[in-house]
Amino acid sequence: MHCCAHAFCIACMGTYVETRVHEGVIAIRCPNFGCRTTVDMGAVRSIVRPEVYYRWRSAFARSSVVVLSEKQFYCPYKDCSALLTLDDHKKEEEFLCPHCKRGCCAKCGVEWHKGLSCEEYQRSEAAEEGRKEVAAFDALVKEERWQRCPACKFYVEKDKLGCDYIQCSIISIASQVGASLES
């Protein structure tokens, strides 16, 4: 793993990550006892099934804790999703993501629509496809009966045999980071 010095069998690590995603965990920790390092999505992308990776990434991106200001948006590229801040940039202009170096439209929140105004893009098939993706994700949330953690708003999946108590791994990690910074 690129996130810490612990080494694991690729098959075992893939199974571990897939199991944790199935359990609704978004901030997946290194399986080594006592290690508090969070597994990097990019580091394990090639060892989990694509549908599991997509589910993990989508849940992570769509359940952000951050309340965006008018000048903030997420990079629309699925392999990036970095939080971006416009500063003095105009929303109608192409914005280059400093993380993935690709152009995007801050006003529409999509990949840069070269040659089209924002209004023209909104009437296009590409915009309709994006709306269908969001609707499909919302349908999946409803079908799987996922719920949001009341603390961090990440989606969690209830285990069939589990109780109604939600233990938030994100808030737990944040608390541990805060505690280690104070000491």
Image: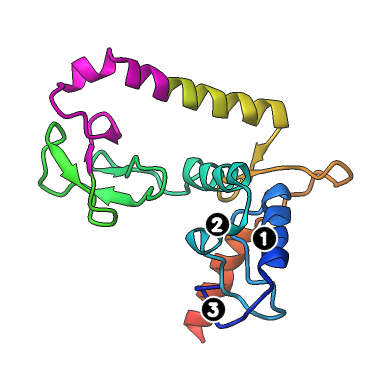
In the image, residue 29 lies at what x, y percent?
A: 63, 67
Q: Earlier in the sequence, mark 2 or mark 1?
A: 1
Q: Is residue 31 magenta?
A: no
Q: Amino acid at mark 3?
A: Cys
Which region of the structure is painted magenta? 103-130
> Is residue 49 placed above or below 177 in the rendered structure?
above
Looking at this rendering, what residue extends furthest in the top direction? 123
Query: Mark 3 to mark 1: distance in Å?
Result: 16 Å
Quarter residue 10 falls in? bottom right
Q: Give the label, 3 or 1, closer to the camera.
A: 1
In the image, residue 83 lies at what x, y percent?
A: 33, 50
Looking at this rendering, what residue extends furthest in the bottom direction? 183
The local secondary structure at tag 3 comes to loop
Quadrant containing the N terminus in the rendered view: bottom right
> Is residue 35 placed above or below 136 in the rendered structure?
below
In the image, residue 23 lies at what x, y percent?
A: 73, 50
Q: Earlier in the sequence, mark 3 or mark 1?
A: 3
Q: Which mark is residue 4?
A: 3
The residue shown at (53%, 81%) is 180
In this figure, which residue is indicated by the disc labeled 1?
Answer: 14
Query: Mark 2 to mark 1: distance in Å?
Result: 9 Å
Looking at this rendering, what residue extends furthest in the right direction? 161
Residue nearest the observer in this picture, 102 or 76: 102
Mark 3 nearby-residue class (10 Å; few <14, some 14–19, many ≥20): some
Model colouring:
rainbow
Query: 19 left or right of 3?
Result: right
Quarter residue 123 falls in? top left
Query: 60 left or right of 99?
Result: right
Q: Report if residue 167 is visible in the image.
A: no
In this figure, which residue is indicated by the disc labeled 2?
Answer: 46
